[in-house]
Amino acid sequence: MWPLRSMLFIPAHKTDWVHRVDRFGPDSVVLDLEDAVPHHLKVAARPQCREAISVLKGKGIPAFVRINNWDEGGRDDVLAVAAAGFSGVMLPKARDVGQIRELDNVLAYVEGREGLPLGSIAIMPLPETAEGLADARHLVAASRRCVTLAGIVGGVVEGDVARAMGFRPTVEGMEQLYLASKMVLDARAGGAGWPMASLIGTALDDLDAVRRLATRAKSFGFSGAILIHPTHVAVANEVFAPTPEEVDYYAGLVEAMEAAEAKGDAAVRYRGIMVDYAMLPRAHDVLREAKRFGVPRAGRS
């Protein structure tokens, strides 16, 4: 499943939206039981969420669920919605290791109940408190299920993370550089190799702004984007896939290294710079992603 270029939020009780989502081409969907469902509908939304998971499974789209705060209905959300096709839990307000471990245990139970492979449901912590943001590495290290972590790369709208940190978001985003970099480092240091960036705070129809945030997130090291509007999916899918020029560069690098090895060398001059074995893992990652997403090498069909 990983890497995922795009995760699209859909209110968990809007099953009619789920039926139409494949036309936008998201790599995955987050069914939202938290902020997108009115308080008086949250319990009633659980069976609708379970139905939506089944619909997405039929479409071949991984289904994540953003549950409510763990101590405010989140546990019951998991117990109610777990079904075949349930790919992961986004845990909002992720605060401490104890929450992650409790969620891990509940997921093991529902996997057994539903006949799902043990460990098949991922955990995506979403730290939105000062404690969680400070301890993000420990959160993801608390369970093998934590293969991803949600961070924020935002525009000028203040949300939970900005409030927790105390910064005032700007268009330039300088105030967010430390936190975004920390989330990526914490994720990878804790064993979560696919950190995702939630892109917020842009006008819904300003696709140029969405592209700027997505490009910024990719430069930080995020592997994909979490999105709030379907028109943003195509932008994220393009930004987080290799370009044909990148494919050409890294394919050429692999070929240059193979030629060097054949001559007994471990380093070679390539396009004016010296490359060696340290550059090969990144090259192979890019080429695998290009093959998966159907990106051709520049100048070739």
Image (spheres, rainbow, N blue to C red):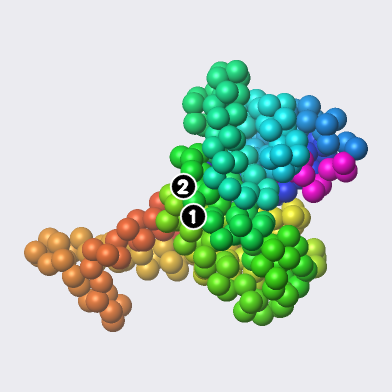
The amino acid type found where label 1 is placed reads Arg
Q: Is residue 286 above or below residue 119?
A: below
* Residue at the extreme right of the image, as rendered: 40
| Side (left or right) of 136 relative to 171 | left
Q: Secondary structure at mark 1?
A: helix
Q: Is residue 126 above or below residue 103?
A: below
31 part of magenta stretch: yes
Q: Is residue 133 above or below residue 85?
A: below
Q: Alpha carbon of mark 2 to alpha carbon of mark 1: how far?
A: 6 Å
- The residue segment tinted magenta is 29-39
The amino acid type found where label 2 is placed reads Ala
- Tell me the residue at 75%/62% (across/down): 159
60 part of magenta stretch: no
Q: Secondary structure at mark 2?
A: helix
- Tell me the residue at 72%/30% (across/down): 76
In terms of image quadrants, where is residue 197? bottom right
Residue under circle 2? Answer: 141
| Side (left or right) of 106 relative to 79 | left
Residue 44 seen by the camera:
yes
Name the foreground residue: 301 vs 225. 225
- Tell me the residue at 78%/30% (across/down): 46
Q: Position of residue 163 (x, y in %)?
A: 73, 65
- Tell me the residue at 46%/40% (across/down): 144
Q: Residues within 10 Å of mark 2 (few under 14, many from 20)?
A: many
| Side (left or right) of 9 relative to 290 | right
Residue under circle 1? Answer: 137
In terms of image quadrants, where is residue 57? top right
Q: Position of residue 212 (x, y in %)?
A: 64, 72
